[in-house]
Amino acid sequence: MKFSNRDLFPFNTDINESGHLSIGGCDVVDLVSKYKTPLYIFDEDTIQRMCSQFVNEFGTRYRNVKVVYACKAFINPVLASLMGREGLGLDVVSGGELAVAKRVSFNPDDIYFHGNNKSPEELEMALDYGVKTIVVDSFYELDLLSNIAFKKNLVQNIMLRLSPSVDPHTHSYTTTGILDSKFGFSIQTGDASMAIRKALKTKNLNLTGIHFHLGSPIFELEPYAIAIDTVLTYLAQFKDEGLNLLEFSPGGGFAIGYVRDELPPAIADYAEVISTTLLKRSTELGFGIPKLIIEPGRSLIGRAGVAIYTVGATKNIPSIRKYVSVDGGMGDNIRPALYESLYEAVSANKMMEEPTELVTLAGKFCESGDILVKDVNMPFMGPGDLVAIPASGAYAPSMASNYNLNPKPAIIMVKDGHSDLIRRRETFEDMMLCDII
């Protein structure tokens, strides 16, 4: 059987002699026997290779660049340590993500703290840990951070998040750089100008750079070029007012493949457009060569993760649809229900069998919208068969919930035929730990 959607799976994915899906040299059937399902498998080598691709592709085109992993895609202590070993920084958006960084003693000089409504406690936590850069998102935060820095007798480095009103043509819920967005200071309304001038005059804040983020996932290259040119051209007016553009970040949002007929541009293509545009326009406008901050999240971790489920009940509605239900669903991957995201699937224990029927893979949660994959060609699926959904590494575990009081899945890392548990499966007792009885 031809493995037609191999590009969606981790690099080290194959079909072994038993006709089973193999990831990182591990038979998925054996992994399920050991760890049960639902199970999230991450391939360590794929993560490392994606880190290297970003560092190399941008680094060969731009001499001063820092790749910073966007933790919201998924983070835990093992992943944070891995990113540090690969030379990446971290983009955190909450006290919880910062706590993970602290847990592994991540270098605070390589942490950028984002978020549109950081609490005073989160900001204090960041300053106490020595986080080098806070990405400020509102006038409220400008004042709040200034007061906290003053009380601690600090001068805190900041970047301002601007909204350039550029549409990256992605889902409305994940488009963040347009005018009608909760994120950033809008250039169009004049808020950005007010924020820049205020930041430059605030004694306990040091404005080192500008950030924007267009959204995610972005399959087009042109929005990056347009937004970089728009923002840099706009910023030129502030040079005489003291703006020294030491850092510049066009965010992340780089796409991955979820279905075989919609694959993203290569990392090299993103790097070429972003690096070339920034270098050309910053030089022309007299900004020199600011440090380029790149923030991949999904594109680093998404392909590395595969979700594994076990089939239970089926329901056949003649001439309409056959539902094949699995033991996970929107509780561990809400993206299909929230964003109408598309996925593909294979039968991990029947990889050599040809597809014979069109089915819809349904979850076990009490919602009609709990559908993981609609209308996918599969071999005959019965109780005990295994379903593997690729490209599940980003925004599935990190957005998981305990809806219907279902425990969150176990997560493992595989490499060279070995597997390690990096997050144990939750128990019913875990879910009641915070309850007062």
Image: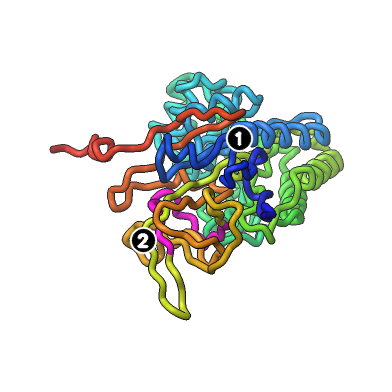
Q: Nearer the viewer, residue 385 or 205?
A: 385
Instruction: Name the residue at 28% across, 36% down.
Output: 430
Q: Which residue is mark 1?
A: 24
Q: Is residue 340 magenta?
A: yes
Q: Residue 387: image x %, image y %?
A: 49, 52
Which quadrant does the C terminus fall into?
Answer: top left
Mark 1: give few (<14), some (14-19) or many (20+) Cα within 10 Å: many
Q: Amino acid at mark 2?
A: Ala
In the picture, measured across the screen, residue 180 lies left or right of residue 328, that is right
Secondary structure found at label 1: loop
**First in sequence: mark 1 vs mark 2:** 1
Q: Residue 113: image x %, image y %?
A: 53, 34
In the picture, measured across the screen, residue 313 lies left or right of residue 170, that is left
Secondary structure found at label 2: strand
Mark 2: give few (<14), some (14-19) or many (20+) Cα within 10 Å: some
Q: Which mark is residue 246?
A: none
Q: Nearer the viewer, residue 218 or 377?
A: 377
Quarter of the image for residue 128 reads top left
Instruction: Name the residue at 51% across, 30% down.
Output: 419
Instruction: Name the residue at 29% across, 53% down.
Output: 404
Q: Amino acid at mark 1?
A: Gly
The main secondary structure of the magenta stretch is loop
* Residue interval drawn in magenta: 324-344
Q: Residue 124: image x %, image y %?
A: 42, 27
Find the distance from the CA under tag 1 to the CA under tag 2.
Answer: 30 Å
Q: Which residue is mark 2?
A: 313
Q: Residue 282: image x %, image y %?
A: 81, 40
Q: Is residue 233 magenta?
A: no
Instruction: Name the residue at 70% across, 38% down.
Output: 248
Instruction: Let me know if residue 85 appears in the view.
Output: yes
Which quadrant does the N terminus fall into?
Answer: bottom right
